[in-house]
Image (cartoon, rainbow, N blue to C red):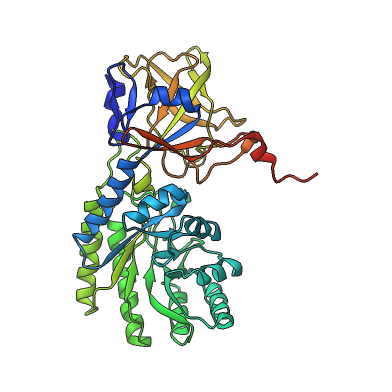
Amino acid sequence: MPGIDKLPVFPVTSKVTAEGHLSIGDVDIVDLADQKGTPLYVFDKETLISTANDFRTAFENHYPEVQVVYACKAWTNISILQILNDEGLGFDVVSGGEIAILQAGGISLEKTYFHGNNKSKEELRAAVEGGIGRIVIDNPYEMDLLESILEDMDRTQKVLFRVSPGVDPHTHSKTTTGILDSKFGIPIQTGQAEEVIAKAMGSKRIICSGLHFHLGSPITELDPYIDAINITLQFASEMRERYGFNLSEFSPGGGFASKYLLSDEVPKASVYADAICTAIKIKSSSLNMPLPKISIEPGRSIINTAGVAIYRTGVIKNIPGIRTYVSVDGGMGDNIRPAIYGSEYEAILPSRMREEEKVIVTIAGKYCESGDILVKDCNLPEPRPGDLVAIPASGAYGFSMSSNYNASPRPEAVLIEDGEVKTIRRRETYSDIFRHDLV
């Protein structure tokens, strides 16, 4: 049946039980939702580890020295980070908060890269004190600020410089970051990147380890990576000739796509790895440059398919000849991506997997915004109040961008492994929402 056919965008352990229910990791999702309540975010450990190792293995097979770092902004959760740390991944952080969560999980910052376009003095100091592996300098002001901090602390720090190669990755305008007109990165073509490199080479505190770029996300094309690699390595060669800059480390960022819809065409990790690593090897050879160590930053592509959002239906509003709205008990408070990016998802009814999908409905959230639509025009069996709705590929940027809008508590999150369920984020209560209020 059509609902079963949507399982390829669900976790790898997903199947349909004899009762026609969705099962993940040998756990009946209908029973789980009855026990835990909804909204509920379900993460499958096997899928998480599998996708992480897909990237690690793919790049290691194509390149002599590579570090895979998980982009924490996709979702920063202690249990998730500990699993990825055990698999040998490093981490890409963008705030003092993400650093603090790593430290709370007992994870060393040695393989952590600190990004962000406006790092505060306090965040930079905490990163240096914590033994951060690399600080990725995003602008001239930050370099001066970091140098003053290092001077005060009598420390040195390895850094990468985030440059902007001026390449359009042809993704959503709000997630494009490698073009000239962006708040991120130091532009190469304006000469500003050269000015920063020249100044940094004279610093006694800043150790210039290499260069970084990030084009945006999600990127399904390979040519933008190749173009940006060629531009950035050419720039590195020129900086070597003029200032003695040694590119010992290079990061082409992340932005790797994840499959949301059955119709999505998304390159495999091995395809990204082949294109990126081959481009680096060819360009480095042509410039007579030693191969640098590389780091890549998958976030969404590691955790997204591992997560499934589970909701329960309430009101069903039929407007004859127009649309049928099926309202659920979550929405933009736990997944704002459809509202701000126009993101699309699949959906199924976990308790009715073998039933024919007879109607076209729009799944609406409970929040007081007309734009609070989770899935527009999807095929489902005739919905009833109280049905469960499962939306796959919900592991990335749901919790990370969640809010308490309309004073709604955030959902619980659980991790499934071999039939066992572990709560990795408790459901918020009303008192959690107003606990910081003062009267």
Q: Quadrant of the C terminus?
A: top right
Q: Position of residue 103 (x, y in %)?
A: 49, 59
Q: Quadrant of the N terminus?
A: top left
Residue at the limit of the structure toward the right, as seen here: 439
Instruction: Tell me the residue at 48%/61% (across/down).
Output: 181
Give residue 298's quadrant in the image. bottom left
Q: Position of residue 172 (x, y in %)?
A: 43, 47
Q: Position of residue 393 (x, y in %)?
A: 38, 37
Give 253 or 17, whichever is nearer the viewer: 17
Q: Is residue 380 left or right of residue 53?
A: right
Q: Is residue 219 left or right of residue 397?
A: left
Give 413 or 205, whichever is nearer the viewer: 413
Depicted 388 relative to depicted 59: above or below: above
Residue 352, can we see it?
yes
Residue 298, can we see it?
no
Depicted 425 relative to depicted 166: above or below: above
Depicted 333 relative to depicted 254: above or below: above
Instruction: Tell me the residue at 34%/20% (across/down).
Output: 21
Q: Position of residue 129 (x, y in %)?
A: 53, 71
Instruction: Tell me the residue at 41%/67% (across/down).
Output: 110
Give residue 43's quadrant in the image. top left
Give 420 or 145, whichever is nearer the viewer: 420
Instruction: Tell me the residue at 21%/67% (across/down).
Output: 64
Q: How many marks?
A: 0
